[in-house]
Image (cartoon, rainbow, N blue to C red):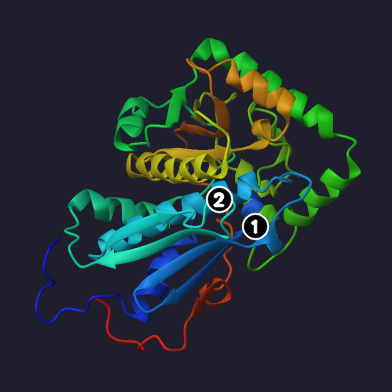
């Protein structure tokens, strides 16, 4: 164990925690529901899921809530590394049904490299782009840079597997086309004006572009402004599948962390990304995706990755104020300057 440097604090001050949590909350979440809560007491940060923000029709088990929180947890780790704090993460500290998804302790021994600051910048630049993509040659580099835990696999879907993805997308959409409760939930979270959560119309794509993307959730049509820039006639993205050996809460959390790592690595390479979970919500479409895996496993999330013009990009989704998701123990020492 390293010895603390004389005169340096042992734990992050409140302002540092606030900065890191703000960055962590830039992570993607299902329908931008942002289903996380953070609590900081002196030297210890806790991450919990916010059950009031679960989507019961799409996510009755809370699997996507945990995946979303896993992505935020990895974003947090990246942020603290850039702030020169190492993190010690205890996942599900109370067992499989732990209300607390992770507790994070800190050390003052982080020595960030230039790549760590590239990842930090990617947190600020990343957004979900639902437009059709052109092909990208950097996929292998992205997968290699995002090291996944041993029980999480990242599979690059070959071109001949694209038809399976499209069929799974169509099956998922057809199964829910006349599901009133699902459609009500979908339209509650998407396609309307909002200032703190959900997916506003300006972040969606118009119907003519949406028809060119064969692997994606059938969202409401977006604003016309996104169609002003020339786009590919068809989506030529590469799709990555994140899968796990088993299908329990620790797997979901690890899948979310891997999702974050891949998204940030792709953003560092200047690539566009769009995470997808619609084809893992129903057993039928999830099983179709499972047949594309080289070994038996449980698909948790997919990512479309490719190239697209930055001009005409859809609007980034909004975020809840940090104070709405972060609470601080009143006994914790007050603010001091950032590291």
Point out the image quarter for the C terminus: bottom left
Point out the image quarter for the N terminus: bottom left
Is any atom of residue 125 visible in this view? no
What residue is rendered at 38% in x and 63% in y? 104
Residue 232 lies, with reference to residue 115, above or below; the image says above
Residue 133: image location, x then y, percent: 51, 31
Badge nearest the viewer, 1 or 2: 2
Residue 246 lies, with reference to residue 322, above or below; the image says above
Residue 74 is left or right of residue 162, and the answer is left
Q: Which mark is residue 68?
A: 2
SS of the residue under disc 2: helix
SS of the residue under disc 1: loop
Residue 241: image location, x then y, percent: 51, 28
Structural crowding at the residue carrying mark 1, measured as other residues with C-alpha within 10 Å and reported as few (<14), some (14–19) or many (≥20)? many
Name the residue furthest top.
160
Residue 2: image location, x then y, percent: 12, 63
Total tally of numbered discs in the picture: 2
Residue 306 lies, with reference to residue 128, above or below; the image says above
Residue 299: image location, x then y, percent: 57, 29
What residue is rendered at 37% in x and 80% in y? 14
Give whichever of 322, 69 is nearer the camera: 69
Q: Earlier in the sequence, mark 1 or mark 2?
A: 1
Residue 321 occupies which quadrant of the picture?
bottom right
Q: Which residue is mark 1?
A: 33
Give whichever of 281, 307 is nearer the camera: 281
Give whichever of 176, 251 is nearer the camera: 251
Q: Which mark is residue 79?
A: none
Residues at marks 1 and 2 touching, judged by CB atoms closer than 8 Å: yes
What residue is rendered at 34% in x and 74% in y? 43
CA–CA distance in space, label 1 to label 2: 9 Å
Is any atom of residue 70 visible in this view? yes
């Amino acid at each position: 164990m390293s010895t603390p440097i004389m005169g340096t604090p042992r734990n992050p001050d409140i302002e540092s925690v606030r900065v890191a949590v703000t960055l962590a909350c830039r992570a993607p979440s299902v329908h931008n529901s942002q289903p996380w809560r953070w609590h900081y007491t002196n030297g210890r940060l806790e991450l919990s899921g916010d059950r009031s923000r679960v989507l019961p029709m799409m996510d009755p088990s809370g699997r996507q809530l945990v995946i979303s929180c896993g992505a935020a947890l990895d974003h947090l780790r990246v942020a603290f590394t850039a702030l020169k704090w190492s993190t010690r993460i205890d996942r599900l500290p109370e067992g499989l049904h732990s209300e607390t998804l992770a507790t994070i302790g800190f050390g003052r021994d982080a020595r960030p490299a230039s790549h760590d600051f590239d990842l930090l910048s990617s947190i600020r630049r990343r957004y979900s782009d639902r437009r059709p993509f052109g092909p990208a040659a950097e996929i292998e580099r992205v997968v290699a840079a995002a090291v996944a835990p041993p029980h999480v696999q990242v599979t690059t879907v070959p071109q001949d597997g694209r038809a399976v993805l499209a069929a799974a997308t169509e099956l998922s959409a057809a199964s829910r086309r006349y599901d009133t409760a699902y459609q009500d939930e979908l339209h509650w979270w998407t396609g309307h004006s909002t200032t703190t959560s959900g997916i506003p119309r300006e972040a969606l794509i118009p119907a003519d572009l949406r028809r060119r993307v064969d692997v994606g959730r059938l969202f409401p049509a977006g604003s016309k402004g996104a169609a002003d820039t020339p786009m590919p006639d068809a989506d030529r993205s590469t799709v990555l599948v994140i899968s796990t050996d088993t299908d329990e809460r620790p797997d979901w959390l690890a899948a979310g962390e891997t999702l974050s790592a891949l998204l940030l690595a792709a953003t560092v390479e200047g690539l566009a990304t769009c995470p997808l979970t619609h084809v893992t919500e129903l057993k039928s479409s999830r099983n179709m995706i499972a047949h594309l895996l080289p070994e038996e496993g449980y698909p948790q999330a997919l990512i479309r990755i490719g190239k697209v013009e930055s001009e005409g990009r859809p609007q980034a989704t909004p975020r809840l104020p940090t104070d709405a998701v972060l609470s601080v123990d009143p006994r914790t020492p007050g603010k001091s300057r950032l590291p």
